[in-house]
Image (tube, rainbow, N blue to C red):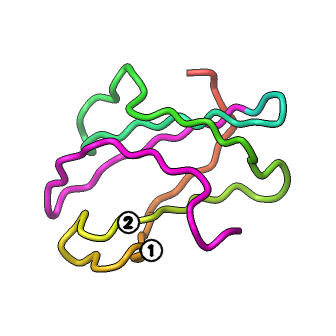
Amino acid sequence: WESLPRIDRSVPMDWDANTWFTLKLTVEQSNGKAIVKGKLWKRGEPEPKDWTLEVEDPKPNTEGSAAVYANVPAGSIESATVPGSEVFFDNLKVVPNSGK
């Protein structure tokens, strides 16, 4: 694990206070690289058809347990005064890719 992000891709998002969101990620590895795709939507709303974000990881972890890391850029939320502010995930499930 590296203390600074190896890959960084951002998508503008209007966050609503006191609102739960669903995040779905999928990772496909091929030829020593990984394609990471993500969707984010408000809980209770239908899942978007299209992926919100897609990024290539040129040096993915190929062994070990699945993990999720996040980086909060300084100024992106009121309480984030420095990069690396804590991010918490709740009700996390890790399942095999379904191809969707």
Compare marks 1 and 2 and give the one earlier in the sequence: 2
Write down the region rendered in magenta. Answer: 1-28
x, y (%) of residue 88?
43, 70
User: Is residue 26 on the magenta stretch?
Assistant: yes
Which quadrant is home to the C terminus?
Answer: top right
Q: Is residue 9 left or right of residue 58?
A: left
Checking the image for residue 72, the label placed there is: 2
SS for tag 2? loop
Tag 2: residue type?
Answer: Val
Q: Can you say whether 21 is above or below 71 in the image? A: above
Checking the image for residue 84, the label placed there is: 1
Q: From the viewer's side, name the closer residue of 75 and 47.
A: 75
Q: Can you say whether 30 is above or below 85 in the image? A: above
x, y (%) of residue 70?
48, 62
Residue sitting at 29 percent across and 40 percent down?
A: 41
Q: Is residue 75 left or right of residue 53?
A: left
